[in-house]
Amino acid sequence: MRISGIFIAFLCVSFFACKPQPADKKILTINSMKKIMWDMMQADEWYIQTSLKDSLHKRDKENIQLYEQIFSIHQTSRKQYYNSYRYYQMHPNELKQLVDSLTAYAAREKAPQKAANPK
């Protein structure tokens, strides 16, 4: 009787140990990450293009302000984004899904532009 009680306790502990950690709840989903990363890439591209035209470099650190606006739009924080980014870097299979998803998203976003401006 005592051994079966220990065995049941062991099973319960094993079951609860397999649940995802609470820290994983703070990780942004792949869908959220791809949208944020797309907006950040767009902001970087705009920043680079305008910086090349600005000979006095008045746009110093404006890209950081753009990132803060992007985080605000997507209702996340810098810390949550970078924690999620590190998480995906440490999990290659999920990072591959994120990159593939971002690539497909970028292709869909650029498709209407190509249709409007045929060359």
Image: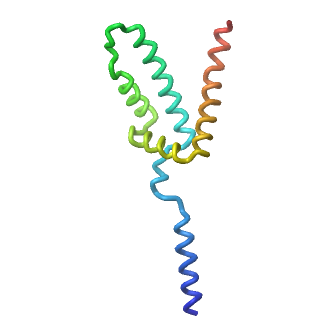
On screen, residue 89 versus residue 118, left or right, reads left
Colouring scheme applied when the structure was drawn: rainbow
Give the image location of residue 115, x and y in percent: 68, 13
Determine the residue located farthest toward the bottom in the rendered image.
1
Q: Is residue 48 above or below residue 25?
A: above
Can you tell which quarter of the image residue 79 is in? top left
Give the image location of residue 61, x and y in percent: 34, 23
Q: Is residue 72 above or below residue 11?
A: above
Which part of the image, by quadrant, shows the N terminus? Answer: bottom right
Residue drawn at (52%, 74%), measured in percent from left and top?
13
Residue drawn at (53%, 44%), measured in percent from left and top?
88
On screen, residue 95 versus residue 82, left or right, reads right
Q: What is the number of callouts on the image? A: 0
Give the image location of residue 32, x and y in percent: 53, 38
Q: Is residue 16 above or below residue 27?
A: below
On screen, residue 117 versus residue 44, left or right, reads right
Give the image location of residue 91, x and y in percent: 55, 47
Residue drawn at (48%, 41%), measured in percent from left and top?
85
Residue drawn at (44%, 44%), measured in percent from left and top?
83
Camera-side residue of 26 and 45: 45
Which part of the image, by quadrant, shows the C terminus? Answer: top right
Can you tell which quarter of the image residue 48 is in? top left
